[in-house]
Amino acid sequence: MSSTLITRIGTLVTNDPALGDGSPLGLIEDAALVLDGGSVVWAGRAADAPDADERHDAGGRAVIPGFVDSHSHLVFAGDRTAEFNARMSGRAYSAGGIRTTVAATRAASDEELEANLTRYLDEALRQGTTTFETKSGYGLTVADEARALRIAARHTEEVTYLGAHIVSPDYADDPAAYVALVTGEMLDACAPHARWVDVFCEKGAFDGDQARAILTAGTARGLVPRVHANQLTYGPGVQLAVELEAASADHCTHLTQADVDALASGNTVATLLPGAEFSTRAEWPDARRLLDAGVTVALSTDCNPGSSFTSSVPFCIALAVRDMGMTPDEAVWSATAGGAAALRRTDIGRLAPGARADLVVLDAPSHVHLAYRPGVPLVREVWRRGARAV
Ligand code: NIG
Ligand code: FE
């Protein structure tokens, strides 16, 4: 494989404070990058750049790490346009809508599910996402959950077992039996295909005791926990996530001071998903409060057909800056390095020697334009493992 010099970069976001201006984004103006063997091998001022086999002119544009979307639900079939339409006409969002997608997903063939997944992955890639996590959770039988994970694992190593999305409609009268299935036979079938275990800890889904049983059963099988926590109401999810050393507590929309303190004192990332608040007309998560408390914040899409049908990280960045108190720098960090932290990865989400050469060339001189120019398709080029993907 030949080396490539990307030169004439207007602003380079490295996310490595030691490399750049000392800020968390590690900004370098008039920069260049050298890529080789799928990795970054050099980053610095263009004037100091070494030679490479090939040369690519960024034309003064900004370059940022590829987005790390650490929370999506992309193995599904069916359509919930009518539910969204009704909601925008006044109906409230509830976890109940998930059942509609479960029925459609069970009825779909493997080919349909994979075609749907690839369609949304292509869409996300065109908007700069170079790593994504995705979950099961719309099958809720042993066979349907395992097949969702098998399909997801063909496209990403960040696969999450979410048999505990809601209590399966088949077990509506016996939730305890469903928890036994999720922690028993279903876990046996799913664990080999997943890295993570997740639970929707929420009124109408699983309570704190059930969530603890599900997450600890997953941990015993080598999966690492992440939790859908405190989305629709206050509840035990966030503190449970911190206690069990989950990689991430996701949503974090309704937080008490004790929840914020727990996140600040633990190792669990708070992943904020503003597409969900946008699409359900709900109150925004308070990113400012979390950041001021010293919590590591990630920003992701939650792309799913019910509560957040967007694959666009740039859209989430714009919402987070406009409505959640994040600065443009913080939002870009959270959508790249923050997502990597939520997936416990150090090889992505940054552009420093040794990191994977996953990057985005923006049609803008600065990363700030992602928030400054909302809704504008600013992703001009996407490179994955050192090769042009878009
Ligand atoms: O993250 N919160 C639970 N799961 C999804 C919603 C899924 C759906 O409505 O289909 C979420 O928002
Ligand atoms: Fe979700």
Image (spheres, rainbow, N blue to C red):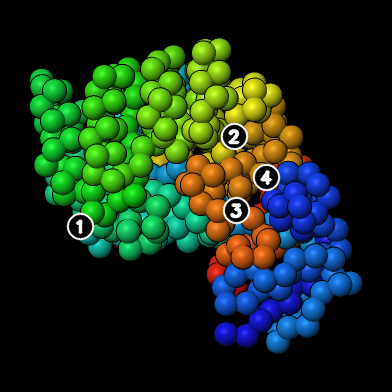
The residue type indicated by label 3 comes to Gly
Mark 1 or 3, nearer chain start: 1
Mark 2 or 1, nearer chain start: 1
Mark 4 or 3, nearer chain start: 4
The residue type indicated by label 1 comes to Ser
The residue type indicated by label 4 comes to Val
Which residue is label 4 attached to?
332
Query: Is residue 228 or residue 324 the one in the foreground?
Result: 228
Which residue is label 3 attached to?
349
Residue 46 appears in the rendering: yes
Which residue is label 1 attached to?
109
Q: Residue furthest right?
A: 47
The residue mark sitting in front, 4 or 1, is: 4
Where does the image place residue 347, in percent across and percent down from the top left?
55, 58
Dot 2: element: loop
Q: Are marks 2 and 1 in contact (CB under 8 Å)?
A: no
Query: Is residue 53 or residue 230 the one in the foreground?
Result: 53
Mark 4 or 1, nearer chain start: 1
Where does the image place residue 76, in percent across and percent down from the top left?
31, 47
Q: In the rendering, which numbered label is found on residue 348?
A: none
Label 4 and label 1: CA atoms lie apart by 37 Å
Badge 1 crowding class, 10 Å Cα cut-off, few under 14, some 14 to 19, many 20 or more, is few
Relative to residue 271, is residue 85 drawn left or right? left
Where does the image place residue 142, in percent across and percent down from the top left?
14, 44
